[in-house]
Amino acid sequence: AQTVTQSQPEMSVQEAETVTLSCTYDTSESNYYLFWYKQPPSRQMILVIRQEAYKQQNATENRFSVNFQKAAKSFSLKISDSQLGDTAMYFCAFGTQGGSEKLVFGKGTKLTVNP
Amino acid sequence: NAGVTQTPKFQVLKTGQSMTLQCAQDMNHEYMSWYRQDPGMGLRLIHYSVGAGITDQGEVPNGYNVSRSTTEDFPLRLLSAAPSQTSVYFCASSRPTRSSYNEQFFGPGTRLTVL
């Protein structure tokens, strides 16, 4: 069974600075996908970024980028130029190829961006 | 498209009562899933379906029933509510693919309190 671990329950950052959220996972699968979801106070789950395990290049989406270390089973999220609207819970999640109906989530990191 | 819709948004039950959480999607997605979110626990998979007439258990299925008679709807039934089922419930849907991964779209959630 897959497991996803987020070791930072809470983090804070000053507006305009950079913050990195950590995630590690465990799996015996060779083809899989990793995701970061954002959950603002509205409760809506929003996909921030995804990484295919077979791709060596780290995914980027505007101010969001990941550091994917497959051998170490590590998948961290870097948020650059933090904005007040980035304040939210962030969840790391794992999915297998063809298994989009069954995501495994970490426990989440609560990020607060301070003005 | 309305995407994934869930009703009700909030519900209070007494122990032993039954109810059905509704979930519908208008994207013609074959895959649908139910998750529960508890404080400090992330999202955990309750049940999922890969098509009409096909359902299976996730990580935490006890106390819940599902059925999938149409592609659009995937209701979650609590037969005899217990305080341990107090949680926020999310429904999600996605389109299957063999060779890659398709994003799961989440509904807005239902906050359930069992007294």
Image (cartoon, coloured by chain):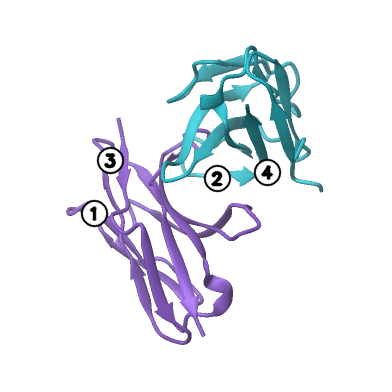
Chain colours: A purple, B cyan
Residue B102 is marked as 2
Q: Residues within 10 Å of mark 3 (few under 14, many from 20)?
A: few
Spot occupied by residue A36 in the image (x, y as percentages of width and height)? 45, 57
Residue carrying label 3:
A30
Which residue appears at 75% of the width and 45% of the height?
A: B3
- Horizontal arrangement in the rendering, residue A114 relative to residue A12 (left or right): right
Secondary structure of residue under mark 1: loop
State how far apart marks 1 and 3 are (Cα): 10 Å
Disc 4 is placed on an element classified as loop
Can you tell which of label 4 and label 1 is closer to the viewer? Answer: 4
Relative image position of residue B12 (x, y in whole percent): 71, 31
Q: Residues within 10 Å of mark 1 (few under 14, many from 20)?
A: some
Classify mark 4: residues with Cα within 10 Å, few (<14), some (14-19) or many (20+): many
- Quadrant in which residue A58 is drawn: bottom left
Q: Which mark is residue B107?
A: 4
Instruction: Give amino acid for label 4.
Output: Gly
Is there a contact, CB below 8 Å, between mark 1 and mark 3?
A: no
Q: Nearer the viewer, mark 4 or mark 3?
A: 4
Answer yes or no: are tags 4 and 3 on the same subunit.
Answer: no
Q: Chain of mark 3?
A: A
Q: Chain of mark 4?
A: B
Res B10 visible:
yes
Secondary structure, mark 2, is: loop
Residue occupying the point 62% across, 27% down: B114
| Dot 1 and dot 3 within a common chain | yes
What residue is pinned by disc 1? A70
Q: State yes or no: discs 3 and 2 in contact (Cβ < 8 Å).
A: no
Residue A112 percent location from the top left of the image: 47, 71
User: Are marks 2 and 1 in one subunit?
Assistant: no
